[in-house]
Image (cartoon, helix red, strand yellow):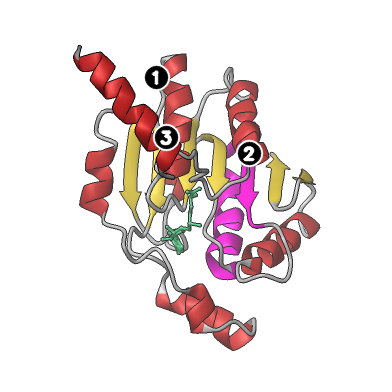
Amino acid sequence: MKKIILENIKKFIFNYTRFGAPSYSYNLEPIQLSEIILSIEKTKELSGSICEIGVARGMTTRFICEHLKLLNYKEKFFCIDTFSSFEKEDIDFEIQNRQKSMEELRGFSYNNFERWKKNFENFNFVKPIKADIKKFDFKLISPLKLVILDVDLYKPTIIALNNLKKNMVSGGIVIVDDIKNNHAWDGAYQAFNEFVNSNSYNYRIISTKCGIINF
Ligand SMILES: C[S@@+](CC[C@H](N)C(=O)[O-])C[C@H]1O[C@@H](n2cnc3c(N)ncnc32)[C@H](O)[C@@H]1O
């Protein structure tokens, strides 16, 4: 009886409101999410950890966790963020050197490390780290086999890429978001291009904004 009533309520809501309409809540495009899963599969036999740098509220993190749970993943999945938005010096750099405005770069200040950790406490492999990635010592979590780098701005992206070099296993993969010119987050695009042009790693750009580097 209870189920019939519930079904009828659902039917009413679906038919007469927009609350039942599906939405897409990811920052990443579907092809980026599939590339992440494919990369987890490709690097499965390598020893090393997975790391997402720039996690925001954790939508992509949660997506990755779902796959790792199905794999019965036993390694660590490091999740690094300031958990308090962009660093002032990184924003200042964009404004002073890259013609950006404060207004277009605002975001992610809602985040809270304690809440974030609670939201992921059921995933034992998730290891959240609160840090400015520019100052983070990757030796503490190396070797790494897969990194998803999504910190938007030039400074943290270029410094992270350079510091990751020595800590990636051979065959490892780094996926970088926002590899697209002429938009608010094209600092990542500039950093990615500088990095791949001054190193000899194989790389490709897929769809509209996904950079992939093979180490
Ligand atoms: C676009 S969001 C990440 C979105 C997330 N990858 C997703 O797919 O849902 C960018 C994140 O990078 C973080 N971030 C920016 N600069 C950083 C820095 N210097 N060190 C660490 N994290 C940083 C911000 O706090 C923000 O949460």
Reading the image, the residue beneath label 2 is: 30
Labels 1 and 2: the sequence-earlier one: 2
Q: Mark 3: which amino acid?
A: Phe
CA–CA distance between discs 1 and 2?
26 Å
Q: Position of residue 85 (x, y in %)?
A: 39, 65
Residue drawn 26% across the image and 53% down it:
113
Labels 1 and 3: the sequence-earlier one: 3
Q: Position of residue 66 (x, y in %)?
A: 43, 26
Outermost bottom residue: 96
Q: Which element type, helix, strand or loop, lies under badge 1?
A: loop
Residue 170 appears anywhere in the view: no
Query: Which residue is nearer to you in this view: 140 or 150?
Result: 150
CA–CA distance between discs 1 and 3?
40 Å
Q: Position of residue 29 (x, y in %)?
A: 63, 44
Dot in front, 1 or 3: 3
Q: Mark 1: which amino acid?
A: Lys
Q: Which element type, helix, strand or loop, lies under badge 3?
A: helix
Q: Position of residue 142 (x, y in %)?
A: 47, 38
Q: Is residue 19 above or below residue 160?
A: above
Q: Residues at badges 1 and 2 in contact (C-beta under 8 Å)?
A: no
Residue 114 appears anywhere in the view: yes
Q: Residues at badges 1 and 3 in contact (C-beta under 8 Å)?
A: no
Residue 20 picture quarter: top left
| 141 to the left or right of 157 | left
Q: Which residues are magenta?
A: 154-178
**What number is the disc on residue 74?**
1
Q: Is mark 2 within 8 Å of ligand 1?
A: no
- Magenta stretch contains residue 173: yes
Residue drawn 27% across the image and 15% down it:
4
Reading the image, the residue beneath label 3 is: 14
Q: Residues within 10 Å of mark 1 (few under 14, many from 20)?
A: few
Q: Which of the image's four quarters has the N terminus?
A: top left
